[in-house]
Amino acid sequence: MSLSYSPIRDAQGRVVAVSTIGRDITERKEMEQMKDEMISAVSHEMRTPLTAMLGYTEFMLDNEVPADQQREYLRITLHESEKLNELIGNFLDLQRLRSRKETVTWRPLPLQPLLEETVALFTRVSERHHITLDCPSDLPRICGDNKQLRQVFNNLVSNAVKYSPKGGAVRVAARREKDCVVITVRDEGIGISPQAVERIFERFYRVNNTACRVFGGTGLGLALVREIVTAHGGEVWVESTLGKGSTFFVSLPVA
Ligand code: ADP
């Protein structure tokens, strides 16, 4: 433990008290190491979308490009900017959460509108998947932060879509189980091996397979999910069969 002292003065500038701030050195070292890891992983991941965005815009400025081709290049540039935005968002959120700087607003929340919003968002984004929601209207409220929980469901559904083939079904469901609400996100995708299941909630962990290489990512999404769910007094886990699909479970205490 390291202690730092700072004087507290009255209006005349006289020291009237001394405040002591204790900081755990190990925790600080861990934070610094985490920052270094994050900076190198994130800057590496930023390169790919940035290179595409730079390449296409430069090409359009330097050449006479037909209108339909321009649209295609703009579409790619937009897609890459969205990826970059998601990456930076996840990175900042995780960092804020880890350093406990995020101001959270806890209130009793109905989950149904949040889940409906997530399902509607991904139905718009991905026409290639059939996304459904099964949520009873009398589901009890849970206590939490709307913005953070939205991020949890968005990350889980985003992965379900990303790691499953065209036409695959993604089923989001919620039910009460004793003193908890359990939310499940089930996909019919590539699945996760038992060895990888042990590690997917770690920061920066990504399975080394074709889908992961094709789609890119940072390995921060599920770390963020775990961080948020744990802060809400809940748990997150996964059941998966390689080649068949995965089901992610989030349990949150009833308010
Ligand atoms: P990212 O998707 O950015 O790589 P995540 O932290 O969200 O990072 O996920 C970590 C890893 O877990 C992914 O790289 C992927 O290998 C695996 N994974 C996550 N969700 C799924 C899923 N629904 N199906 C198969 N693999 C998944």
Image: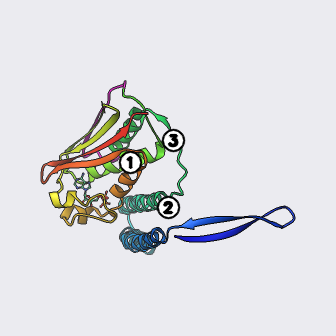
Do the numbered discs 3 and 1 sit on residues whose CB atoms are within 8 Å? Answer: no
- How far across and down, in percent of the image, does residue 173 sit? 28, 35
User: Distance between the Cα atoms at labels 3 and 1?
Assistant: 13 Å
Q: Quadrant of the C terminus?
A: top left
Do the numbered discs 1 and 2 sit on residues whose CB atoms are within 8 Å? Answer: no
Q: How crowded is mark 2: few (under 14 residues within 10 Å), some or many (20 or more)?
A: few
Q: Identify the residue at the far top of this view.
A: 138
Q: Which amino acid does label 3 sit on?
A: Trp
Mark 2 element type: loop
Q: Give the mark, 1 or 2, whose residue is nearer the N terminus.
A: 2
The residue pinned by badge 2 equals 99
Do the numbered discs 3 and 2 sit on residues whose CB atoms are within 8 Å? Answer: no
Vertically, is 201 above or below 135? below
In this view of the protein, which residue sits in the foreground, 125 or 184?
184
In this view of the protein, which residue sits in the foreground, 185 or 17?
17
Q: In this view, does 39 lie to the left or right of 246?
A: right
Q: Give the mark, 3 or 2, whose residue is nearer the N terminus.
A: 2
- The response on whether ligand 1 sits within 8 Å of label 1 is no
Q: What residue type is labelled 2?
A: Ser
Residue 106's disc number: 3
Magenta segment boundaries in residue numbering: 125-138
Mark 1 element type: helix
- How far across and down, in percent of the image, does residue 200 sit? 26, 59
Q: In the image, is residue 134 part of the stretch drawn in magenta?
A: yes
- The response on whether ligand 1 sits within 8 Å of label 2 is no
Residue 128's disc number: none
- How far across and down, in percent of the image, does residue 182 sit? 31, 37
* Residue 76, picture quadrant: bottom left
